[in-house]
Amino acid sequence: MKYSYIARQPILDQNKCTVGYELLFRDGPNNSFPDIDPETATSRLLSDHFLSNHYQTLGENFGFVNFPYQSLINLIPTLFPSHSLVIEVLETCEPSDELLSAIKHMRKQGYKIALDDFIPNQAWKPFIPYISVIKFDLRAISIAKAKIFMDRVKGYDIEFLAEKVETYDEFQQAKAAGFTLFQGYFFSQPEVLQRKSLNPTFLTLVQLCKEISKENLDYKKLEEIITKDLSVSFKLLSFVNASASVSSKIQNFKQALVYLGEQKLRRFVSIVAIASTQDDKPNALYTLSIQRARFCELLWQRARVKCNNFDLEDGAAFLTGMFSLLDSLLDQPLDNIVEQIPIDEALKQALLKKTGILGNILTLVQSYEHADWDVVARQSKVLQLSEKDVIKSYDDAIEWADVMMDMQL
């Protein structure tokens, strides 16, 4: 049984009553931040706890969650209910016009925005009207200096949170200075919570990513895929039913999908997908996987126009390219993996023996990646593809893969 881990540290008011928790990603029972990309850490935390174990993690309290720059720009926080989430803008974020636009949008949607580990700076001045909470790290800035800034912005409806309060005296001094929220070892160290982790199957993620890449979403097809995977279906219903804007509980997956709409649905699938990837695999391998899948698909589409013996369903070429890297992604021999997944016999033969139309396409793609131009030329002739067809397909596949990876941040 796999587990997911999260550290939560209580945030208290002046009467030492818990009003929320800061949620911190952990990759094991040790209470320390792992060596992991911040974007991936945020995705994993949200996937494992906001999409499935929301109430057990927070109860009726707010969850304060750190969001890196790209997640904010992509409006990832809007996937989650505004009534239980405080969006923390990481101190590493650049106060750009792009970020300000995202903050304004999320504030308008009813979200509370917090500036984490805040250091007063003129560049943040335009943001102040849209901020609900400002957090000062008492180890980095004195209470006296924080008070100067707090007095300067008294006209705004902002609460101030004192971080890393370690003694009773600091608590009293912070209260006297005007802080109303508090967090630190004086009250409680972060508590590590362990949950059973429901991870989507790789095949489900591939199928979902394939579907959300289409211009027009097929809700019936998406429903069929989601209903076959306990993890994704549970997270989907939990997420939708936790939304403040749902007047009555969602009773089936079709309702949930229609409620989300195309944009949120694409983001939901993307965040679950990236959160479910194996930590020890480089991003380049995933990028190559979807790039190769799209390259195969585009070649198949162009070849189909010129050949009359294509009786495969749409998507077979995409899956051929995607599955061709399963051995590297899963650290297992490809023949063992292929026997365990329900795929067409033609696809299996293409992967294992490079036979058939799909085998020709895969051979062309792999040869192109390795600059084996003689093989590329031979396979292009078999498929009746011109050099222009192949180059165009490759360029389009790279662009599509870049967009897909950007969606997952």
Image (cartoon, rainbow, N blue to C red):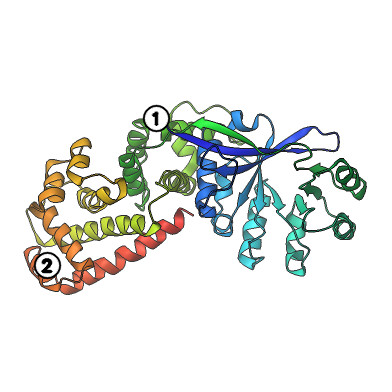
Residue drawn at x 51%, y 37% as measured from the top left? 48
At which x and y percent is residue 280?
40, 50
| Residue 197, numbered circle | none
Q: Residues within 10 Å of mark 2 (few under 14, many from 20)?
A: many
Q: Quadrant of the N terminus?
A: top left
User: Which residue corresponds to mark 1?
Assistant: 230
Name the residue nearer the viewer: 73 or 180: 180
Q: Residue at x 58, y 33 (%)?
A: 193
In the drawing, what numbered circle is on residue 380?
Answer: 2
Dot 1 or dot 2: first in sequence order is 1
Asked if residue 227 lies left or right of residue 377, the reply is right
Q: Residues within 10 Å of mark 1 (few under 14, many from 20)?
A: some
**Disc 1 vs disc 2: Cβ atoms closer than 8 Å?**
no
Is there any visible trace of residue 233 in the rendered image?
yes
At numbered mark 1, what does the secondary structure look like: helix, strand or loop?
helix
Q: Quadrant of residue 152?
A: bottom right
Q: Is residue 184 above or below residue 255?
A: below
Q: Residue furthest right?
A: 176
- Marks 1/2: CA–CA distance: 42 Å
Q: Amino acid at mark 1?
A: Leu
Q: Is residue 328 left or right of residue 277?
A: left
| Residue 201 image position (x, y, % from top left) | 34, 38
Give above or below for 373 relative to 43.
below
Asked which quadrant contains residue 192, the reply is top right
Q: Residue at x 77, y 37 (%)?
A: 187
